[in-house]
């Protein structure tokens, strides 16, 4: 007959093992709560005044002025242009944001301009006039929000 014996003298006592497991579990719970996920909200962007039905729409969402100036978007997406209006939905944490977009009508993946004047359709949040900046295009997202952007052709 096969006998199996287990000696605890080389292993951690059961009370100590349970205590350490409880400490690890509590530590993990505290870490999860200290890095609690910020509430997220839906940002719905309706783009209208699309006159040219070709190419792609490049959308960038910025969450600070420095990144806005450096064209380093927080999040973004690219979508085909197949209709005169486009609806895009993002799910973002509470914060201050700005949206910039352009329609790449010649498929070169860049916003073509001449002396800083856009040669392709573009749009910004708050439909700001003049040269867009973070301050004149920003908005607060602290609940689900819908914005309309009229493309400038």
Image: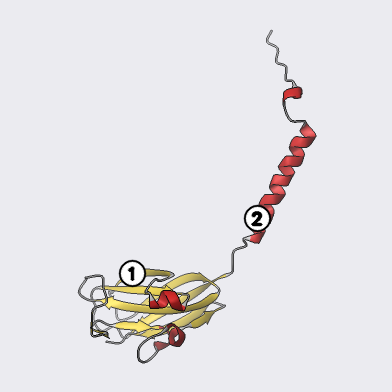
For label 2, count other residues whose C-alpha is less than 10 Å away and answer few (under 14), some (14-19) or many (20+). few
Residue drawn at the location 72% of the way across and 50% of the way down: 26
Marks 1/2: CA–CA distance: 36 Å
Q: Residue furthest left?
A: 106
**Where residue 142 appears, x then y in whole percent?**
57, 78
Report the quarter where the C terminus lies: bottom left
Residue drawn at the location 22% of the way across and 76% of the way down: 105
For label 1, count other residues whose C-alpha is less than 10 Å away and answer few (under 14), some (14-19) or many (20+). some
In this picture the colour scheme is secondary structure
Q: Earlier in the sequence, mark 1 or mark 2?
A: 2
Q: Residue furthest top?
A: 1
- Horizontally, is 121 left or right of 141 in the view? left
Q: Residue furthest bottom?
A: 129
User: Compared with residue 80, is residue 52 higher up or lower down, i.e. above or below?
Assistant: below
Residue drawn at the location 41% of the way across and 79% of the way down: 99
Report the quarter where the N terminus lies: top right
Residue drawn at the location 75% of the way across and 38% of the way down: 18
Residue wearing tag 2 = 31
Residue 54 in which image quadrant: bottom left
Nearest the viewer among 34 and 40 is 34
Number of dots carrying numbers: 2
Residue wearing tag 1 = 78
**Where residue 118 appears, x then y in whole percent?**
26, 84
User: Compared with residue 57, is residue 6 higher up or lower down, i.e. above or below?
Assistant: above
**Where residue 110 appears, x then y in whole percent?**
26, 73
Q: Secondary structure at mark 2?
A: helix
Q: Secondary structure at mark 1?
A: strand
């Amino acid at each position: 007959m096969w006998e199996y014996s287990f000696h605890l003298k080389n292993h951690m006592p059961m009370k100590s093992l349970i205590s350490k497991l409880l400490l690890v579990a509590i530590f993990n719970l505290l870490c999860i709560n200290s890095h609690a996920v910020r509430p997220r909200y839906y940002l719905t962007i309706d783009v209208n005044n699309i006159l040219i039905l070709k190419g792609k729409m490049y959308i960038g969402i910025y969450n600070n002025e420095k990144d806005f100036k450096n064209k380093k978007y927080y999040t973004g997406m690219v979508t085909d242009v197949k209709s005169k209006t486009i609806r895009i939905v993002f799910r973002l944490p509470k914060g201050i944001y700005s949206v910039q977009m352009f329609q790449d009508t010649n498929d070169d993946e860049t916003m073509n301009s001449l002396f800083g004047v856009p040669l392709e359709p573009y749009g910004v949040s708050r439909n700001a006039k003049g040269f867009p900046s973070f301050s004149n295009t920003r908005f607060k997202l602290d609940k689900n929000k819908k914005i309309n952007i009229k493309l400038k052709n």
